[in-house]
């Protein structure tokens, strides 16, 4: 999907043009001390571009559900090209903190009294082979309430947000079923039962809880150690962990979750009996060349065998790191989200959705396996001036930096003759004439 094929939000033409301009402006690596909306080298002055951006980000007609439409269309279109039986929808939360608030009056207390900021909730669509496609739903918690791409979203606890998002995903017209991937925070018997009863498939990293296996109550860690001792793990290909090369090893058991759920009602812990759930227990380990375990994940899922093998479930959780990379691309490694100077949560949320579309375009560049796609990525990395690893020559931050330079260069050439520009540059930068 190029810039000319983005499905524009249902807003007036003038605002649609401003939206595309803002997406282009976010196709760059923002420096920490200059995280404002940059202007392209056109005949328009930088001040005029800044004013136009401000009007867009503070326009009540530009709603978050409308700005989510291009993202969902991108995810829907990209997923339709995938040949897998299912897709991953990764749920996660991230704090946005602003050391200098920049006049923001709707920052909310997140944990303790001095922990002030916004809370970002994201549901990221990822291909079953780990390629990120698009954020399909976003919430931003502020002092004034919850801002969301879903009109009926309510401010609730983290896990209470998941089921409404699962239900909403049924309306996105995706052509493949979803496996909802969530980290250890989602290890909750009550929520497992509610999600399963509603027909949703989940993959959750579990704590060391008790389950029933072979009619005996066992801890997950004890079962994992038993599998290790019996050498029932199988190698499942390469996997890296925190920059270290390794191999993924997997094993699977069937377990039953029949214990009552623990819920707090009026501050008191109450047991809530429920249906016994038969789940797939997947133990995944990343080991280095010497056999040392770098990481171990205990995973519970109600996905059927017809959907995914043991390895595919293990890698489904392994690919959860894509949402962490998305947060990093929005924050320290891309758009410098925590340094934006917009004064309200709603303006931040609007700009965040624009920046998310820039991320989507970069992911599409990364996923293009054609000869031309690789050549274009090489050009962008060269333009960026960034050093990349031999095994990973095209990173999202490097592509962002290269795209911005390329767009700026092409925009400039719309207004200047290349020969005259070269002469002008050589006159004032003598080194260029000897290159």
Image: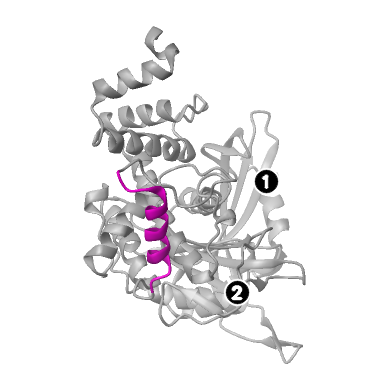
Q: Is residue 46 magenta?
A: yes
Q: Is residue 36 left or right of residue 228?
A: left
From the top left corner, tell me how far across and down residue 424 is, in percent.
34, 21
Q: Residue at x 44, y 12 (%)?
A: 431
The quarter of the picture where residue 186 lies is bottom right
Q: In the rendered view, tell whether residue 193 sits above or below residue 330.
A: below
Q: Residue at x 65, y 87 (%)?
A: 272
Q: In the rendered view, tell whether residue 263 sits above or below residue 1.
A: below
Q: Which residues make up the magenta segment?
A: 43-59
From the top left corner, tell me how far across and down residue 96 is, in percent.
61, 61
284, 191: nearer the viewer: 191
> Which tag, 1 or 2, sits closer to the chain's start?
2
11, 358: nearer the viewer: 11
Residue indicated by mark 1: 228
From the top left corner, tell me how far across and down residue 55 is, in percent.
39, 66
| Secondary structure at numbered mark 2 | loop
């Amino acid at each position: 999907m190029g810039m000319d094929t983005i499905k524009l939000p249902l807003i007036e033409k003038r605002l649609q043009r401003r939206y595309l301009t803002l997406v282009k402006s976010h196709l760059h690596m923002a420096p920490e001390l200059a995280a404002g909306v940059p202007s392209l080298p056109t005949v328009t002055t930088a001040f005029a571009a800044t004013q136009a951006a401000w009007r867009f980000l503070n326009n009540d007609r530009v709603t978050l559900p409308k700005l989510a439409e291009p993202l969902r269309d991108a995810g829907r279109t990209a997923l339709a090209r995938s040949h897998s039986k299912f897709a991953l929808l990764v749920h996660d939360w991230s704090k946005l903190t602003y050391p200098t608030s920049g006049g923001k009056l709707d920052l909310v207390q997140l944990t303790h009294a001095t922990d002030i900021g916004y809370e970002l909730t994201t549901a990221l669509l990822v291909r079953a082979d780990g390629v990120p496609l698009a954020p399909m739903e976003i919430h931003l918690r502020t002092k004034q309430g919850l801002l969301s791409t879903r009109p009926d979203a309510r401010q609730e606890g983290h896990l209470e947000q998941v089921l409404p998002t699962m239900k909403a995903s049924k309306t996105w017209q995706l052509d493949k079923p979803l496996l909802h991937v969530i980290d250890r925070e989602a290890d909750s018997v009550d929520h497992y039962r509610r999600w399963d009863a509603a027909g949703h498939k989940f993959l959750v990293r579990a704590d060391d809880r008790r389950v029933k296996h072979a009619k005996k109550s066992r801890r997950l860690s004890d079962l994992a150690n038993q599998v290790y001792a019996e050498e029932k793990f199988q190698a499942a290909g390469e996997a890296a962990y925190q920059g270290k090369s390794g191999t993924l090893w997997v094993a699977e058991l069937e377990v039953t979750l029949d214990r009552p759920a623990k819920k707090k009602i009026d501050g008191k812990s109450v047991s809530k009996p429920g249906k016994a759930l038969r789940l797939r227990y997947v133990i995944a380990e990343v080991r280095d060349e010497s056999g040392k375990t770098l990481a171990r994940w205990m995973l519970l899922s109600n996905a059927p065998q017809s959907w995914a093998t043991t390895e595919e479930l293990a890698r489904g959780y392994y690919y959860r790191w894509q949402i962490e990379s998305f947060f990093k691309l929005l924050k320290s490694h891309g758009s410098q989200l925590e340094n934006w100077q917009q004064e309200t949560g709603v303006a931040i949320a609007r700009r965040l959705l624009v920046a998310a579309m820039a991320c989507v375009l970069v992911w599409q560049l990364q996923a293009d396996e054609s000869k031309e796609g690789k050549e274009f990525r090489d050009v962008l990395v060269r333009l960026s001036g960034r050093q990349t690893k031999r095994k990973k020559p095209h990173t999202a931050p490097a592509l962002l930096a290269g795209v911005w330079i390329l767009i700026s260069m092409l925009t400039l050439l719309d207004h200047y003759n290349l020969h005259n520009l070269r002469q002008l540059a050589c006159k004032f930068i003598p080194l260029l004439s000897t290159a």
